[in-house]
Amino acid sequence: MRERDPIQLPVAGLLAVIAVAAWFGAGYFGQELLAEIAILAIFAMSLDLLVGVAGMVSLGHAGFLALGAYATAGATVFWGWPPAAALAFSVAVAGACALGVGLFAVRLGGVFFIMITLAIGQMFYAYFFKARAFGGDNGMSGTPRFDLSPLGLETGDPAVFSALMLVIAGAVYVALLLLVRSPFGMMLTAIHQNENRLASLGCPVRRYKLAAFGLGGAIAGLAGALMAQHTGFVSPDLAFWTLSGEALIIVILGGSGSLVGAAGGAAVFVMLRDHLSDGSFWEGLRLSGDIATHWQLVMGLFFIAVVLLARDGLYGRLSWLVDRVRSAWRGRGGGA
Amino acid sequence: MPDGALLRLEALDAYYGRSHVLQGVSLSVESASVVALLGRNGAGKSTTLKAIMGIVAPAGGSIRFDGEAIHHLASHRIARRGIAYVPEDRGIFASLTVEEHLSLTLPRAVTRGPSSKEAIYEQFPVLAERRRHRGNELSGGEQQMLAIARALTQSPRLLILDEPTEGLAPIVIESIAGIVHSLKGAGLTMLLVEQNYPFAVGLSERVYVLGKGRVRWEGSPAALEASPEVAATWLGV
């Protein structure tokens, strides 16, 4: 008998330590990267709930991120809502829309589900692209950040804002982990493994899938609201399918179904992009700095390598490695 | 055929793509009886069971359970009417423990407390020992027992078993047979698909022989024993 997922909490703890150390060590630009990583981690974990836990591969998840971002932008700029209230509004709007979309999307499986989520994500993109009130394809700026001045904190300071984002990402992680390990999460895991089987046991499979889809959309909306606060700017690109694809890559890179893998994958993704697109990084390796202009090519090769060498992602590979070391250790102890 | 059958299939038709796999299958299962469905590979046995469970949508005909038409219902609603199904592949979830499998079935069954789960463990001591093991850590026989045990947590009125002895060692088959016989002793209604001819014939009160999607013969096990030509033509024994 093996303990299920024994490295989940140690890896999460390690990531937390790295995040705290990075926060203390980071300068202005580093804090911006940290905030970006934290927000992307929330978005990736929300997708992991769908893809890795419940087995619903969505290519339109960015649509809900964009909804959350636009809801926050609209509520704060047009209606003058405080950012915290706008954030709650974003979560509600994205969650409600995900439930609406889910009503028919969860009836489909496999490639049909991918195609319908892709189509719906692109519909959001097309809407925001044409929506004059939101600046159309130019997007709109002016979304304010949380007001923490009563606590003596200035969220305009990147260090304060990135710390806040890290705390929120940590809270989302803990909440999702508890959810995945609850009876509800067990049902989703079972649905992923064999949907028909669970249905013939009397489980209303679609209702569970719908709940997961709605929840995933709501958390994506949260990430969108935070993203709007972070950059102060929203544009139709937030709904574009390539962002959904990026999140999917992050989930697969990190190791789908593990949550902490998605969070770690977000960090790896942002750091890689940052380094590979920086000419001085390549010059440091005694290579031409021009390679930086082709960073996406290098990134692509990296992903191909990960998928070939670690089909279950970085987390899955690490888990496998720990398992091997442990059993080798035990084998030696038993043989002596 | 007397009325009051618990399960009644009438002129059931089903297709896989263009191939007409069930061609007017009719059969009935009386309360507290065991019915065996025999036939060669590809005769339509498993498809009949899947049609009952709503996994394969019938193209025509009707399925009635306790008088109610169920052929248009979703799988989970059929299960909730009181039909438990143990599929051929056993349907064990690799990453869930034995304990979790038994809690999985229905929220209702879970809240009914540990009593029912404990009763199951009493009936399946092997599972009690392995309650914290995951599905992929169980042997084939243990998986089969878990699949049957899980079906029993649904407190079914009809238990459908698809080849419960397939691919198991003789000694394991014996213990599975013991369990199924004790369920029959307790008065549970069962519909059984089996390739293991002696096991099926020894257990059931009524036998249907399927061939190429149709019912080719029906009768008592004794009558089947007395008709070697049926067995030779449709069962290959």
Image (tube, rainbow, N blue to C red):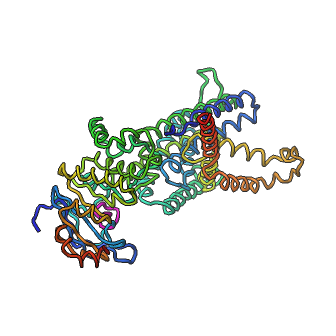
* Relative vertical location of residue B40 with respect to residue A189 in this rendering, above or below: below
The x and y percentages for residue B143 are 39, 50
Where is residue B220, by image quadrant? Answer: bottom left
Q: Answer above or below: position of A333 versus B67.
A: above
* Location of the C terminus of chain B (image quadrant): bottom left
Q: Please check the rendered image and state whether residue A285 is part of the magenta-colored stretch, yes or no.
A: no
Q: Which residues are magenta?
A: B47-56
- Is any part of residue B55 visible from this angle? yes
* Image point (46%, 52%), residue name: A193
The image shows residue B46, relative to residue A272, as above or below, that is below
Q: Quarter-wise, where is residue A131 in the image?
A: bottom right
* Image position of A291 (left or right of B60): right
Q: Residue at x 29, y 63 (%)?
A: B193
Does the stretch in magenta take in B50? Answer: yes
Left or right: residue A159 versus residue B28 is: right
Residue nearest the viewer, comparing B124 with B49 = B124
* Quarter holding residue B196: bottom left
Magenta span: chief secondary structure: helix
Residue depicted at 40% across the width and 60% down the height: B167
Q: Nearer the viewer, residue A275 or B125?
A: B125
Identify which residue, A3 or B3, lies in the foreground.
A3
Which residue: 39% across, 57% down? B168
Measuring from the top left, give residue A270's x and y in whole percent.
70, 44
How far across and how far down the image is residue B176, in percent?
31, 52
